[in-house]
Image (cartoon, grey):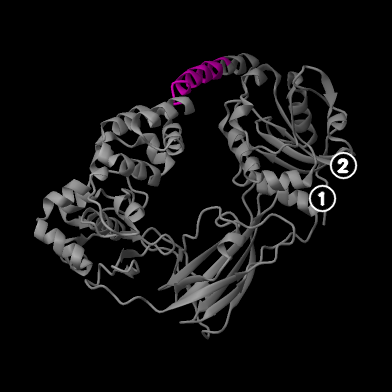
Amino acid sequence: RFGISKASASAPATVTLEHSPESVVEFDFDIVPPPVRASMPPVTKEQTAMNDMRKAQEDSIRIAYMNTFYTPEQSEALAKKLGLDSEKVKDIMTDARGNWRVIESFLNEVPETDRNKAIDLLSVIAVKDLNDIDAETLRDHVATPDVNSRHFKQSILNPRVWLEQLTPYKHVFRNAFSETERNSFRANPDKWSKWVSDNITIDTSWNPLGFSMHPEGVLKGRKADTHSAAIFFVSGARSFGIPARLDPVTCKTQYADNSGKWIDVDLFGKVVTPNNPKGRINISYTHDGGLEPKYYPQFTIAKISDGIPSTLELGELLPVSQIASEPIEVDAGQYMMVTGRRMADGSVLAKIRIFTVQESAIANVPLTVRHATNGVEVIGNFDAETRYKDPSGELRSILSTTGRGYYVLGLIAPSHEPSAHALNDISAIKDEFEKWGKSIVLLLPEESASRFDSSLYKSLPSTIKWGSDPDGKIAKALKDGLNLATSDLPIFIIADTFNRVVAVQQGYTIGLGETLLNTILQLSE
């Protein structure tokens, strides 16, 4: 028997299952979005022109600001001056973007003996952190005493534990505990876990949204939710020179022993528990030539504990071939695999498989992504002889550009967030579009085409052809021919040169590139 409970404000959704340990439960279901009922006010040509003028001004301000960022040449000069690896410095300084002054100042002021450690610190934090980390936080963490551990760089020097705001917490912990206490914790991390369990009260009421508390605040108030308490444990451990982390797959609180082995910590039972019995998951998948499933967009695996599924962090957007290259070690117990395929109409073909991982055994789990069974239908018409302007200003027909057969036509706008997301989605699966080999024609409004900077999208497929939509005639033809409520961009269609449209996407939806490609793959089945 299988059941899913409805989530409420006070309780999360739960999954319950009564079955023998060897049995597997599997079922399919469709997720169908509600129909779009756009009700936007009409916009006059004068309003559109005024908005375009403002966008052009915004573009010029942004570009002028971006021109102040560090260049590769400046990075090489800085590396030479400080005697550092030029490639590492180039990656760091260019990724720092508008925060380059903070990073440059930090590298210049760090003592020569700590410069390589400073590079290690800057290399281990995320690009997003390079964009906004402050000098005080960098100075605090580069002062981390050296520890002979293979986990030093990633799990001691590294300021980030999970997704919390980075703060200069290490000196706070070192000042709050005597040298004798710090040495005792480092020699026996169990004592640190017991200190946390004895002195930090777990509060389940006052942080319902689960915001990560600063470790300094937890130390001062001696109260935290369970997740913030785990971050507190890891932050303190790293401050004392103990390698510690939240496991990237299970989010378990862990420290590494002298051999480098990760030990699970139960902060709330006030003891370090023996590691749970382990098993392994072997994912089997046969690539049928379509889009290779990736973690999160097409499939996830969750462990079910006390009826509540918790998704394993196997790596965002990692392809199944990489995740399944060898069996994944996990705690023994009950698991759930969810797969999904997004269709052109926004619906998702989903499948759930619930299985059990036995202690010291391998669970062989096939990964199956459902295919549409009803084929592709013609939903409208668009004249392939319709003309657009190519980059030289010459009028050309869609047919003369694409040749006979299917093609993708996209209408996008410059400095337009939904259009930018759509282009990034297409870039993410560039190789698959190039294997398809057909043309993707991308058109911009004629009046604003000059403001579009294609250099921001260097990873787009080579099959893309650029142009503009003279007087908005193509946008109007699509609106009228496909009964669209508005002409809002972006608009993408898949059509053939017999004027048949088989798919349309208006506005940005998550995984737009994947949705287009799934429809394309159905055309060849």
Q: Residue at x 62, y 47 (%)?
A: 511
Q: Does 201 appear above or below 42?
A: below
* Residue identified by numbered label 1: 377
Question: Magenta stretch: dominant SS?
Answer: helix
Quadrant position of residue 109: top left
Residue at horizontal 74 percent and vertical 58 percent from the top: 289
Secondary structure beneath disc 2? loop
The residue depicted at 65 percent of the width and 18 percent of the height is 450
58 lies above or below 185? above
Q: In the image, 327: left or right of 68?
A: right
Q: Residues within 10 Å of mark 1 (few under 14, many from 20)?
A: few
Q: Nearer the viewer, mark 1 or mark 2?
A: 2
x, y percent for residue 322: 58, 60
Could you tell me if the residues under marks 1 and 2 are in contact, i.e. CB atoms within 8 Å? no
Give the residue type at disc 1. Answer: Glu
Quadrant showing the N terminus: bottom right
Is residue 56 shown in magenta? yes
Give the residues in magenta: 53-71
User: What numbered label is drawn on residue 405?
Assistant: 2
Residue 19 horizontal side relative to residue 372, left or right: left
Residue type of the residue flagged with mark 2: Gly
